[in-house]
Amino acid sequence: MTKINKSFIWGSLFASLTWTISLYLYWSLNSSAQMQQSSSTSYSPVPAQLISKQRPYSSNDVLPENKNELSRKAKKWEKYAKNKYMLQDNKYDVLKKPKQLDENKKVYNPNKVSDNLLHKLQPIVVLPDFDEPGMVQTPEELLLKEEGYKNHAFNVLLSKKIGLDRNLPDTRHELCEKQIYSSNLPKASIIICFYNEDLTTLLRSVYSVFQRTPESILHEVILVDDYSDRCDELGEPLETGLRDIFEDHQNNFLKEWYKKVRILRLHNREGLIRARVLGARNATGDVLVFLDSHIEVNKVWLEPLLERIKHEETTVVMPVIDIINADTFNYTPSPLVRGGFNWGLHFKWDNLPEGTDDG
């Protein structure tokens, strides 16, 4: 117990001595620094207020700042700060600030790294184009857009505004453009199943088929309504919309084309696969082609498929499926992929192995 007390006392003494020495050194260093600073700034024993009254300035005197110059610089930088960092009532005035600074006050210097960096970091205000088809302009359009995403998971408002007829980029490979196909191809029955589909999108799908498919190989288009409950849009309006598709600019009805379209309405909800089977049973063409109800076919889309089937009737072919953006409806080419299943039997797209598309 005595040894522990002695150790504690010696430890306390050592700690106290260490702190005493540290405080003494700190006080000594501060005192010497203050003395050096006061001696370096004391150029004259006469107070600065009396220098101008006693003698002219010498080269060793610290001259007082010119008040006019100081005021001028303060105003200059104050105006610079206002122009550069403060927005006026008009929120787009910020776009004009760099130009005004450069021409009028010459404050902004593009050759100065700091000024150039600040200039590049300024936000660029993009003025919205209210004439764009996808812009919401009324509360009704906002409701239509929100309901469209809720019911169909794509921009229904934009789909209605772009209409049925629009130009698509030719996304074929350059070698495909040089292919020559047989003039005696089998005729195809196009089967499109739908359930509560958006009317404009469905009509655009049908329109693209008739617009980009030669009449000689298009036998019919069968629309299978899988018991949709939106009769206000997919009932009579659908039939009227189909009729309008086949009116040319002189309002002459193209009866021969209209005869190729049939609507098969189911009395119960069957699901996609059974609906396709029922559509196939009612088809009379040589080849069955199944399409979704929200697609757009591109140039020379059917001929390559029928060419393969002509050479081998048991062949099941599949086209390259390009991408239509659900928000903007931009049409972009798809990479070369093939469909497959994982071990959970979920369908997925896989990239083609290297060398598959050579030649």
Image (spheres, helix red, strand yellow):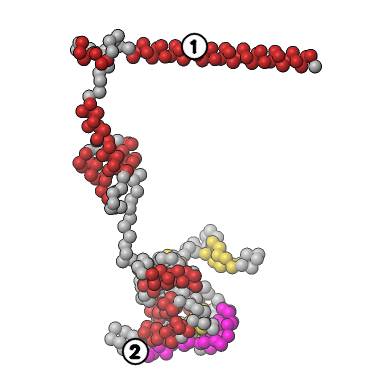
Circles 2, 1 touching at the beta carbon (< 8 Å): no
Q: Picture coordinates of residue 108 (x, y %)?
A: 26, 39
Within 10 Å of the Cα at label 1, are there few (<14), some (14-19), or many (20+) other Cα atoms? few
User: SS for tag 1?
Assistant: helix
Q: In this image, 214 relative to 192: left or right? A: left
Q: Which mark is residue 28?
A: 1
Specify few, some or many for label 2: CA neighbours under 10 Å numbering under 14, 14-19, or 20 or more: some
Q: What's the residue at 30%, 9% (across, down)?
A: 45
Q: Is residue 182 magenta?
A: no
> Residue visible at 58% across and 13% down?
20
Quadrant of res 31: top left
* Residue 279 part of the magenta segment: yes
> Can see residue 28?
yes
Of circles 2 and 1, which is in front?
1
Q: Which mark is residue 355?
A: none
Q: CA distance from mark 2 to mark 1?
A: 107 Å
